Image (cartoon, rainbow, N blue to C red):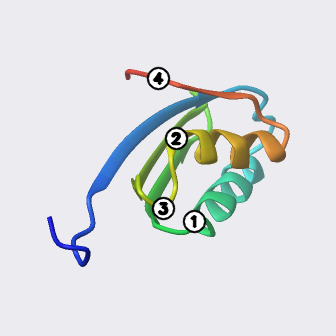
């Protein structure tokens, strides 16, 4: 693999504590500011967060930490 190639990882997290739809915008914005993060989808009702990211630049732990800093405990999820 050349250094110019980017491998995108699709990560699904579950978060707790969303109390209003504006939480979606806060989480989406925070994750999209991280290096290597592309598409982010946050589902208010289920607390599901989906993020496409370059694992070499931003790992799953970084995603969890960013969501946690907003006050929403998050964990990786298989679905």
Q: Residue furthest top?
A: 78
Q: Which mark is residue 57?
A: 3
Q: Residues within 10 Å of mark 1 (few under 14, many from 20)?
A: some
Q: Residues within 10 Å of mark 2 (few under 14, many from 20)?
A: some
Whether tag 2 and tag 1 are in contact, CB under 8 A, the answer is no
- N-terminal-most mark, 1 or 3: 1
Q: Quadrant of the N terminus?
A: bottom left
Point out residue 55 in the picture as x, y percentages from the top left corner. 41, 52
- N-terminal-most mark, 3 or 4: 3
Q: Residue at x 68, y 52 (%)?
A: 27
Q: Residue at x 76, y 53 (%)?
A: 22
Whether tag 1 and tag 4 are in contact, CB under 8 A, the answer is no
Up the image or down, 58 lies above or below 77; here it is below
Q: Which residue is mark 4?
A: 77
- N-terminal-most mark, 2 or 1: 1
Q: Secondary structure at mark 2?
A: helix
Q: Which residue is mark 1?
A: 32
- N-terminal-most mark, 1 or 4: 1
Q: Which residue is mark 2?
A: 60
């Amino acid at each position: 693999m050349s250094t110019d190639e980017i491998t995108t990882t699709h990560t699904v997290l579950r978060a707790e504590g969303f109390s209003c739809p504006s939480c979606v915008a806060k989480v989406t914005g925070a994750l999209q500011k991280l290096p290597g993060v592309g598409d982010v989808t946050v589902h208010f009702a289920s607390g599901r967060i989906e993020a496409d990211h370059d694992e070499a630049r931003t790992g799953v732990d970084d995603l969890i930490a960013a969501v946690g800093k907003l006050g929403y405990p998050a964990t990786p999820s298989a679905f």
